Image: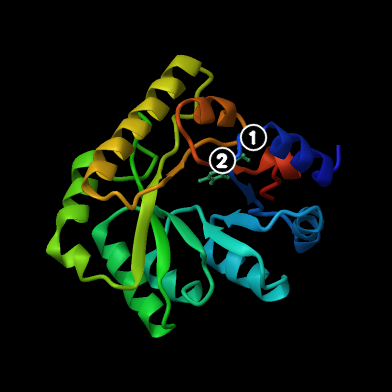
Amino acid sequence: MSIQQNLNNIKSSLPKHVTLVAVSKTKPVSDIMEAYQSGQRIFGENKIQEMAEKQELMPKDIQWHMIGHVQRNKVKYMASFVNLIHGVENFRTLKEINKQAKKHNRSIDCLLQIKIASEDSKFGMGAHEASDILQSNEFSELKNINVIGVMGMATFTDNQEQIKEEFTQLKSVFNQLKALNPRLEVISMGMSGDYTLAIACGSTMIRVGSSIFGERNYN
Ligand SMILES: *Cc1c(COP(=O)(O)O)cnc(C)c1O
């Protein structure tokens, strides 16, 4: 099936309140253009430099989302254009994003990445750390970022019950944080293999790569 057919199939199955991020990491600009021509405007990348290179070559009405681990020393390469940063794992990174956004006179939307998976390899902060950040004075002084929600990745497993538990946990952390900060509205959870379950558990934003663009080749 073509990229366009894959996209149309997925989009026609989504509830209206769910935003689709097309994850184009490792894929060439020609593939992204095909998705663009069928109407997709939101693309996700997990490497800052790869995203910046693609952004230069592509139509300027694309909204670029950084979905991967954010290296603080590379924030400057995306600060002029990035639309949403999903993977903010600590306060120092928020501060750096704020600093770089300020240089460009803009305000950057961010999600706090919450660790829900049991694997040690997955990044993210605990619910406690997230609520401490949202309540701190230092945070309230960061005028060039907006925290608009949370992001999480489930454990890489076939065990649907476990994935469901982890998604439910993220939704509950979101509810806790929203009680502190009513401006939170985004729950970014769900990928190709689990987005239907994620939506059933409360996701408002899914990040789908291989079901749109096909398997990735890392060689
Ligand atoms: C690669 C990636 C995705 C998309 O994965 P697929 O299984 O190809 O849909 C989603 N989220 C993050 C953080 C990723 O790195």
Where is 102 relative to 137, above or below? below
The residue type indicated by label 2 comes to: Val
Q: Nearer the viewer, residue 118 or 134?
A: 134
Q: Residue at x 42, y 68 (%)?
A: 108
Is the CB of mark 1 within 8 Å of ligand 1? no
What is the x, y in percent for residue 136? 14, 59
Q: Residue at x 35, y 49 (%)?
A: 184
Mark 1 element type: loop
Residue under label 2: 18
Quadrant of ligand 1 in image: top right
Residue furthest left in the image: 137
Is 98 left, or right, of 18 in this rendering?
A: left
Q: Residue at x 29, y 44 (%)?
A: 178
Is 121 left, or right, of 8 in this rendering?
A: left
What is the x, y in percent for residue 144? 34, 73
Mark 2 element type: loop
Is 106 left, or right, of 147 in this rendering?
A: right
Q: CA distance from mark 2 to mark 1?
A: 6 Å
Image quadrant where one finds the N terminus: top right
Q: Nearer the viewer, residue 39 or 73?
A: 39
What is the x, y in percent for residue 74? 44, 71
Where is 218 relative to 84, above or below? above
The residue type indicated by label 1 comes to: Leu
What is the x, y in percent for residue 95? 28, 68
Q: Residue at x 33, y 53 (%)?
A: 183
Where is 119 relative to 206, above or below? above
Q: Is residue 126 visible?
A: no
Question: Could you tell me if the residues under marks 2 and 1 are in contact, i.e. CB atoms within 8 Å?
Answer: yes
Residue under label 1: 14
Tell me the crowding category of disc 2: few under 14, some 14 to 19, or many 20 or more residues within 10 angstroms, Cα based.
some
Is 40 left, or right, of 80 in this rendering?
A: right
Tell me the crowding category of disc 1: few under 14, some 14 to 19, or many 20 or more residues within 10 angstroms, Cα based.
some
